[in-house]
Amino acid sequence: MPVDIMSSLKLDDNDEDNQDKNRNTCKIPLKKHTKPGPGEHQLQFNYSLWFSRRTHGKQNQSYDQNLKYITTFASVEQFWSLYSHLLRPTDLPGHSDYHIFKDGIRPMWEDSANKDGGKWIIRLKKGLAARCWENLILAMLGEQFMVGEEICGAVLSVRYQEDILSLWNRTANDAITTSRIRDTLKRVLNLPPNTIIEYKMHVDSIKDNSSYRNTDVFLK
């Protein structure tokens, strides 16, 4: 890959802050026009990897300043080359997030592709995130959800007490599509029977400035 993944993930003190505030001034690069190499297996969509991390102590850093674009990949081979160099969930510090979104879609509630949508949220006990995160990414890249262009991206959120996966889609008020996404999630992740899956619309996240609090739907 044409980017030094590990050095790109290093954050200095000015990069660590509250990711739920001041989300409207994003000046993040979008299209990267990445193409598959000779003989590589092209994905249906190009995807971009982003990284964010916040810690307590600084209150002035906005979400978009905290969010770091890493690279874009267009093929199966480019994805595995990237993925093999990433820290695993168990090695990430607390309050770190990986975001893998279709190229051109920023991992922000207000992005035009996201603003009318929402996300399925899966809370995991420590130790389960690595397997579930990999299965989620592979299902997304392999178009296993069968909902057209509804899927926007996926997020892994490493927290101190739990890890959280979320899958973002474009249309929150399409009950048939969101239910299909939920059912596919349960199948591809092979979740324990007592796992709670929650849905939250992005308009509600904007209202309460929170990604994961006050979710709308609780399913076991």
Image: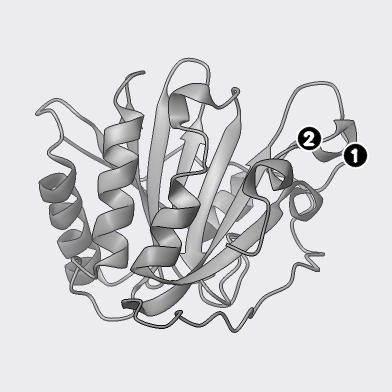
In the displayed orientation, state which residue is furthest to the front: 38
**Residue at (61%, 28%) from the top-left corner?**
95
What whole-number distance in Å separates the C-alpha atoms at marks 2 and 1?
7 Å
Is residue 216 shown above or below 139?
above
Q: How many marks?
A: 2
Is residue 3 shown above or below 198?
below
User: In front here: 90 or 177?
Assistant: 90
- What's under tag 2, amino acid-wise? Asp
- Asked whether residue 118 is in view, the answer is no
**The N terminus is located in which quarter?**
bottom right
Left-right relation of 14 to 169 = right
- What's under tag 1, amino acid-wise? Asn
**Residue at (68%, 51%) from the top-left corner?**
4
Image position, residue 174 (x, y; %): 27, 72
Image position, residue 65 (x, y; %): 81, 51
**Residue at (89%, 37%) from the top-left corner?**
14
**The C terminus is located in which quarter?**
top left
> Which residue is labeled 1 in the image?
60
- Asked whether residue 115 is in view, the answer is yes
Q: Are marks 2 and 1 in contact (CB under 8 Å)?
A: yes
Which quadrant of the view contains residue 90?
A: top left
**Residue at (53%, 60%) from the top-left corner?**
203
Q: Residues within 10 Å of mark 1 (few under 14, many from 20)?
A: few
Left-right relation of 160 to 30 = left
Left-right relation of 206 to 201 = right
Q: Which mark is residue 17?
A: 2
Left-right relation of 188 to 173 = left
